[in-house]
Amino acid sequence: MTAKVGVITFPGTLDDVDAARAVRYADVEAVSLWHGDHDLSGVDAVVVPGGFSYGDYLRAGAIARFAPVMGSVIDAARKGMPVLGICNGFQVLCEAGLLPGALVRNHKLHFVCRDQWLRVENTQTAWTTRYEPGAEILVPVKNGEGAYMADEPTLDALDGEGRVVFRYVGGNPNGSRRDIAGISDPTGRIVGLMPHPEHAIDALTGPSDDGLGMFLSALDALQGAPA
Amino acid sequence: MSTDTVKHAESTPDTEQPWAELGLKDDEYARIREILGRRPTDAELAMYSVMWSEHCSYKSSKVHWHYWKENTTEEMRAKMLAGIGENAGVVDIGDGWAVTFKVESHNHPSYVEPYQGAATGVGGIVRDIIAMGARPLAVMDPLRFGAADHPDTKRVLPGVVAGIGGYGNCLGLPNIGGEVVFDSTYQGNPLVNAMCIGAMRTEDLHLAHASGVGNKVMLFGARTGLDGIGGVSVLASETFSGDESGTGRKKLPSVQVGDPFTEKVLIECCLELFLEGIVVGIQDLGGAGLSCATSELASAGDGGMRVELDRVPLRAEGMTPAEILSSESQERMCAVVKPEDVEAFLRVCRKWDVIATEIGEVTDGENLVITWHGETVVDVPPRTVAHEGPEYHRPFARPTEQDVLQSATPDLLPRPSTSDELRETVMTMISSPNLASREWVTQQYDRYVRGGTVLSQPCDSGMIRIDESTGRGVAAATDCNGRFVKLDPYTGTQLALAEAYRNVATGGATPLAVTNCLNFGSPEDPGVMWQFEQAVKGLAEGCRELGIPVTGGNVSFYNQTGDTAILPTPVVGVLGTIDDVRRRIPTGIGNEAGESLILLGETREEFGGSEWAHVVHRHLGGTPPKVDLAREKLLADILVAGSRDGMISAAHDLSEGGLAQTIVEMALIGQTGARLVLDPDMDPFTQLFSESAGRVLIAVPRSEELRFTELCSARGLPWRKTGVVVPEMDALEIQDVATFPLAELRTAWEGTLPALFD
C-alpha cells in the first residue's frame, strides 16, 4: 500500500500547491481535498496548508474550522490520523480545538516574510522523527498573525509535556510566547507550526531543503517504520 | 425622478449638461453630439467622459505612438503574440509557453489613500493578466516617494507597502522585486506602479473580443457599488437635485476599496473557465468599469452588443445607469460565452461562490445598446467610445532651463581624496535612503508562495520557474533613474532601458521584451511634453537597437504639485527567459571556493545625476552617463553565455552608488569578505562612485577565470580583474583605501529604513 496525504484547499488557500509538491518530493501521493467535501478520499494523513482561508477577514481560521471537510478531519484526527497545520493551517487547527492556544497579530503589526532558524525540540512526533534532537533548521516564515499565545498554565503544560515541537532561534519574528513556532497535541500525531517547511524542500527555491524532513517523517509514520 | 433615456434626450435637445464638470472640453462635447446626432443621455455622457479622459484614451500621448510602429521590425514583431492595444503584451518564450506582463500606475489614489490605492493597483494589474488567459505568477512594484525624512512620507510609504503586501500576499502571488526611490519632487505625488507577470500555454491566449452574434455577455465577480465613481457623481447631483438625503446617495470616497479574497477566488474561477474552454472573449473591469469593458469588448469584436443594465448585481440602492456604468468597484470581470456554454459557465462560478449574471448578448447591429428596465439609455457606436477618442497635438518644446541645468556640471564639487574621506563617503552612501537595504519593505511581501521563485529582492532581477519539468523560467526587472531623465530625457530613458535589460541578463536570462509605465507631469506644459516625446523616442529607438519589442505600456500624466512636476519617470520593464533556472546567477559572493572578482565594462568619470552628487551635495546638473546599447548587448550575451557554461558564480550590476555600493551588497548578501584592488592609473573616487553604464561586477571560480577572460577579450568586452573573494575574512578591504568589517557595513546598510519607518 502506498501512502496518500491529503492537502486541503479552502477558498483563499495559497500554499496548497507547495504543500502538495513537498508531499510528492517525499515520494508520497498528494490528494487534493476540497473544502466543501466531507469525503477524505481515503487519505492516510492531512496537511492543512497556508493562505487566507475565506479571506480571514474575521479572525484567521475562524470560518475554515466550520468547513465540511474540517468536520471529517477533526473526526479522523481524534482517531489518530496524522495532521499537519502550516501557518493558516495551524490557525485553523487551533480554532478547531485540535491544538491549544491562538495566533494573534505580529508584535510589530506588519506582515513578516523572512528566512528563519528553528530548533526542533521534539523528534518523537509523527512529523519530526527524521530530525536529530535539537537540530536547527532554516525555513521561511511569512505571516501577519503568527504570534503564538496561550495562558501560562497551558504554556507550562506544553513545555512540560514536550509538546513545543519548534522554537524560534536567532530572533523571534512575531512576538510568540516563549519563542514557540510549533506545537503538537498530546499524541504527537497532530502538529501545527507557523513557519513553512513546504517552502524549504529545495535550495533552488527556498533557503534550504531542511523542511523536507517533516514530510519524510510522515511517510515513516504511515509505513510504520520504527520511529 | 425619471431616467434620462435616448427618447428623452431626443425630445429635450437643449437640456444643459455638466460636460465641463465631467472633464470634457467644449469641442469634445460638440463631437459627441455630432456622433450621436443628438445630445447624449446622462449615461452616454458618463461613458464618453470617462473613456475620453486622459487615463483611458491616451489623448495627449498617442500622437507619439508612431515611434513604436516605426521602430518595431518584423523580427521583433515575430516574438509577440499580442502587443500594444491588448490588455497586456504577450511573448512566446518557447516550449509552447507564452508569457504576458504589464505595468500600470496607481499614483494619484495612492497619495489620497495609500493602503487602498496601492492595494487596488495590484488588483487591477492582476486582472489585466487574467484577461489574457494567463495564470498570474508574480508581481513587482516600482515605487517613488518624497524625501525619506519628510513627515508625510511616513504616512504614505508604510501605507503603500502594507497595501501592496495586504492585497498581493492574499492573492498568493510572490512579489519578486521592484524599486523604492526617494526624491523630494515626489512629495505630493508618489508613484505607485504595479507590474504583473503571467504565463499560459500559447493555445490558451484569450483576447478581449466580443464575437459571434447571439453569444452571451456575462458579468462576474463582485457586486457593483458607488465606490470609485469620482467625477460622475456630478451627474447624480444634477439628476437628483434636492435628493441628497435619500438612501444610497451618500458619496463614497473616489478611491476604490479592494477585497483580495474575492480577487483570489475570481482568479481561480477564471482559470477553471479557461481550462474548460468556454470563454470566447474576456475583459477585466478596471478604470471606467462597465463603460470600458462593454465598449472595448464590442468595439474589438463584431460591433453590436445589447446590455440590460438593470440585471447588474448592485451593493447600493438607487444607483443610476450612469453610476453603474462608471463605477470602479473592484474584482469584476466580463466574459463573452456561447449560449450553450452559459450553464457550464454558471456551474464553475457557483463552485467558487462567484456571483455571475448574464447581462446581455452580442448582436448583429453596429451599436452598443444599453437598456434600463426596458428603456434605452445608451445607443452608441462602440468604437467612438473605446477607440476613437480625441487626439491632441499638444505643443512641446525643449525648455530654456535645460541648458542651464546641463551646464551646471558636478565637475567642481569637492570630492573625497584621502583614505579617511573615502571611507566616510562609502559609509554615508550605503546608509543613504536610496542605497540602503530595502528589506524593511520587501519583508512585508511574500516572495515564496507557489514555490517557483529563484531570484527576488535584493537581486538585480526577479526570476521565477514556469515549468517544473524543464526548469524553464522568466526574469524581469524594472528601472528608471529620474535624475538622468531630467538631465537628458532621450539618453536618460535609454539608460533606464539599458539598466533593466542588464539586470535581466545579470541573473543569467536572455532579455526578450519591454513594457513601460511613463510617469510625467502635466501634458499641458510644453516642457513636460518635450520630456515625454524624447522619452518615447529614446525608448523606441533603443528597443530597436537591442532588438526587443515594446509589447505595451501605460501613461500617467499630471504627476505634479502646483507648477512643479515630478522628475520625469519612464519606468522600463524588461522581461527575459532562461532555459533552466538552475543556471541563474545569484547576487551574493561566496558560492564557490576561490572566486576572483572581475569588473566588466568601462569606468569613466561620470557624475552628472549621480547618487553621490545627490547625497553629498544635493546637486543635480550636467549630463547623464553615456549609453552604448551595442555594448550592453555584448555584455548581456557574455553574461548569458557565462551562466549557461557555469563560468559565473555571482553577478551584480553597477548603477546608483557605483562600484562601492555593488561590492558592499555582494559581500553582505553573500555574508562573505572580499578584497578590492583598484586600478593604480585612475583616481579611487571615480572608480568607487562613478555611475558609468554598461558595467557588471562578477565573481568567477578561479578554475574558470582564464576561459572566461579569454572569451571577453575575444568578443571585445573590456574587463579588469578587480579583486578576490576572501571567505576567511569578515570584512571588505579596499586595498590602499580602507577596511570595513562586514558587521559595520551591515549595520549602516540595514539600519536606515527601520530607523525612518518603524
Image (cartoon, coloured by chain):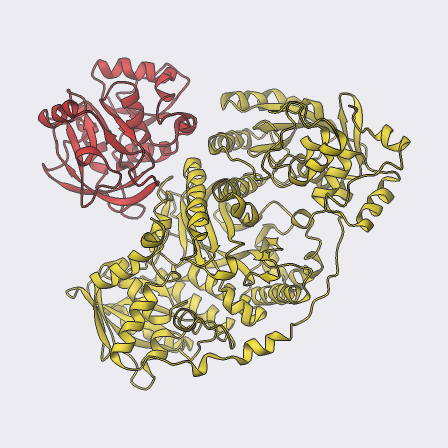
Chain colours: A red, B yellow
Please state, as top left, top right, bottom left or bottom right, where the N terminus of chain B lies in the image.
Answer: top right
Instruction: Using the rendered view, name the quadrant where residue B701 is placed.
Output: bottom left
Q: Is residue B304 visible?
A: no
Residue B631 image position (x, y, % from top left): 47, 73
Q: Is residue B118 left or right of residue B428?
A: right
Q: Is residue B600 visible?
A: yes
Instruction: Using the rendered view, name the quadrant where residue B539 is placed.
Output: bottom right
Q: How many marks?
A: 0
Residue at 22% from the left image edge and 61% from the top image edge: B592
Instruction: Using the rendered view, name the quadrant where residue B5 is placed.
Output: top right
Q: Is residue B567 left or right of residue B441?
A: right
Relative vertical location of residue B102 with respect to residue B612 in this rendering, above or below: above
Q: Is residue B342 left or right of residue B43?
A: left
Q: Is residue B57 left or right of residue A88?
A: right
Residue A216 image position (x, y, % from top left): 20, 33
Relative vertical location of residue B432 with respect to residue B118 in this rendering, above or below: below
Q: Nearer the viewer, residue A189 or B42?
A: B42
Q: Nearer the viewer, residue B714 or A46?
A: A46
Direction bottom: furthest residue: B681
Residue A205 image position (x, y, % from top left): 32, 46
Residue B175 image position (x, y, % from top left): 41, 46
